[in-house]
Amino acid sequence: MRILVVSLKFSPGHFSHMVAYTKLFLELGHDAFLFLSKDYSDMVEEQEIPVLFFEENTRYPEADLVLFHNVSTINHKVADYYKKRVLKLFMFIMSHLIVFPST
């Protein structure tokens, strides 16, 4: 299963959590990536996990499951795209998890 952990709004306090989730998915045998705002690029240099950076006019990576962390309105366009295409879409809003079934 291909899993994306997504944050398009820069918030360095969330970075370690996103890395931990991605490492967990990798250890469970999934194909997992971080899909991040370019603002995270300085923090990513020392990570041993795959990272893709968001660009406004780029094609979004394929995924079977998408986990949005540090949800913000900047993620809406990308969330709408994945909501129509993926098996599961998850969003963390503070300590709450919201699951959107695919349509």
Image: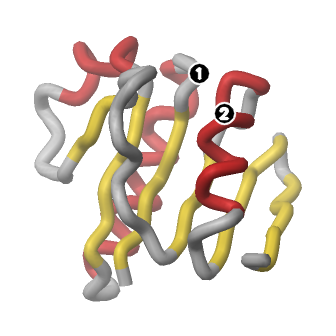
Tell me if 5 is positioned left or right of 48 in this view.
Answer: right
Q: Quadrant of residue 28?
A: bottom left
* The C terminus sits in image quarter: bottom right
Q: In screen coordinates, is 93 left or right of 67?
A: right
Front-lying residue, 40 or 79? 79
- The colour scheme used here is secondary structure
Q: Is residue 72 above or below residue 42?
A: below
> Which quarter of the picture shows residue 97?
bottom right
Which of the two discs, 1 and 2, labels the residue nearer the N terminus? 1
As drawn, 88 above or below 38 = below
Splitting the image into 4 quarters, where does residue 58 fall? top left
Q: Amino acid at mark 1?
A: Lys
The secondary structure type at the circle numbered 2 is helix
> Tag 1's secondary structure?
loop
Please name the residue that numbered disc 2 is placed on. Answer: 75
Residue 57's spot in the image, x, y percent? 40, 24
For the residue pair 23 and 31, the one nearer the viewer reads as 31
Quick one: label 2, few (<14), some, or many (20+) residues within 10 Å? Answer: some
Left or right: 37 with respect to 10? Answer: left
State the image coordinates of residue 1 (x, y, percent, origin top left). 37, 84
On screen, residue 54 above or below 90:
above
The residue positioned 12% from the left and 32% from the top of the image is: 46
Instruction: Please tell me which residue is depicted at 48% across the width and 76% down the height of the picture.
Output: 64
Q: Is residue 94 left or right of residue 28?
A: right
Residue 26, percent across and down? Answer: 28, 73
Q: Nearer the viewer, residue 15 or 68?
A: 68
Please say if the residues under marks 1 and 2 sit with CB atoms less than 8 Å apart: yes
- The dot on residue 78 is none
Residue drawn at the location 19% of the way across and 51% of the way down: 50
**Residue 9's disc number:** 1
The kind of residue on which mark 2 rests is Asn
